Amino acid sequence: MTIRRAFEGRPYGSLPGSVDGPGRVPSADPDFAPPTSRAPTKGRVPVTTRSLSVRARRAALPVALCAGLATAVTACSSDPDEGTNGVGKLSATDIEGKARTAADGADAVHLSGTLVSKGGSYRIDMRLKGTGATGTVTSKNSTFTLLRVGDELFLKADAGFWSHKDKGGDPGSAAAGKQLDDKYVKVPSGDPSYQELRGFTDKSALLKGMLGLQGELSKGDRSKVGEVRTIRVKAGEDGEGGTLDVSLQGTPYPLRFERAGGAGVLELGDWNQDFALAPPSKDATVDYGSRLPKR
């Protein structure tokens, strides 16, 4: 069959019967009318693109509100102590107790910060353990190193410390200062300064004296000391009796302590990390016997 014969005798716009029934397309039917030309049914509003858009927006609004509400509920119901050691759920008194127990049970600690007392202000940086300590103490006019191994206590300072440079000094003390410059001077146990200096090297005594909170305890904010999550315990309504930040990760060690009355701020770290302790060599040590040189 040729193309001409296939369409012979059919109206314009029709198709062969084998393709589309009688062989007519709608546009070739005299009774066909496009949908847009029909009159709307009585009482029914025509559906337009604009009305569909409005309906879509109305349907989307409650969905969005529900999604937002679900997110808010999830956020509000999340546990602030998730992934922690659970100490944050305890009372302030119990948190402080846990921190003290952890500190007492640790073999070593690194303590640094400021101490303010009637005698002045000190900056300390000490590594402490039960058998001794090493570190520096800085006062207004001097810096010295302390080393304690067992009961043996050594003090090292520059020439200015021994020559009383901060008090004017004299030729004799200046000469003595040069001899003692950067030397470890053994502090006799009978010297009046022994107990005072040893106090900076005694882990138990130092922590007991420094970590005291004064007043009614309450829980403060959750925060961080470095990268470690913490919970704060405060004494007094605004922490005027001191504040203690306790670790929420692992063992609940105290990590930061602000003393009452603005008497200093201390940070505690490297808990249970051991360090070497050994007496200085003999050629680096000066032993004055029962008394230190007067300052």
Image (cartoon, rainbow, N blue to C red):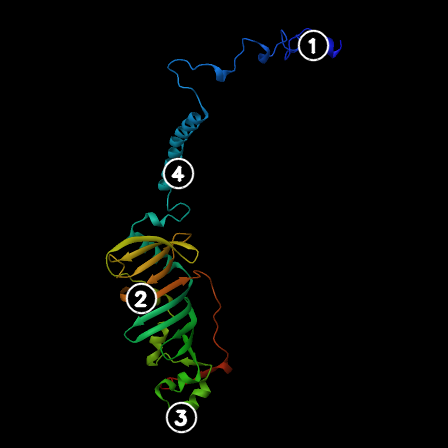
Circle nearer the viewer, 3 or 4: 4
Q: In which quarter of the image is residue 263?
A: bottom left
Circle 1 — which element? helix
Q: Distance between the residues labelled 4 and 1?
A: 66 Å
At a point 38% along the width and 33% down the height, the residue shown is 66
Disc 3 marks which amino acid?
A: Gly
x, y percent for residue 179? 46, 87
The dot on residue 7 is 1
Q: What element carries label 3?
A: helix
Instruction: Where is residue 251? Give x, y as percent.
Output: 40, 54
Q: Residue at x 33, y 70 (%)?
A: 115
Amino acid type shown at disc 4: Thr
Q: How crowded is mark 4: few (under 14 residues within 10 Å), some or many (20 or more)?
A: few
Depth check, front residue: 145 or 16: 16
Asked whether the beta carbons under mark 2 and mark 4 sit within 8 Å of each other, the answer is: no
188 to 244, vertically: above or below: below
Ranked by sequence position, the earlier of labels 3 and 1 is 1
Q: Distance between the residues labelled 3 and 2?
A: 39 Å
Crowd band around label 2 with a 10 angstrom C-alpha radius: few (<14), some (14–19), many (20+)? few
Q: Tell which tag, 2 or 4, sits nearer the viewer.
A: 4
Q: What secondary structure is marked by label 2?
A: helix
Amino acid identity at mark 1: Phe
Identify the amino acid type marked 2. Answer: Gly
Q: Marks 3 and 2: which is nearer the front? A: 3
Mark 4 or mark 1, earlier in chain = 1
Return the mark for residue 172: 3
- Give the number of the disc on residue 71: 4
- In this rendering, the answer to whether 204 lies above or below 66 is below
**Numbered mark located on residue 209 in the image:** 2
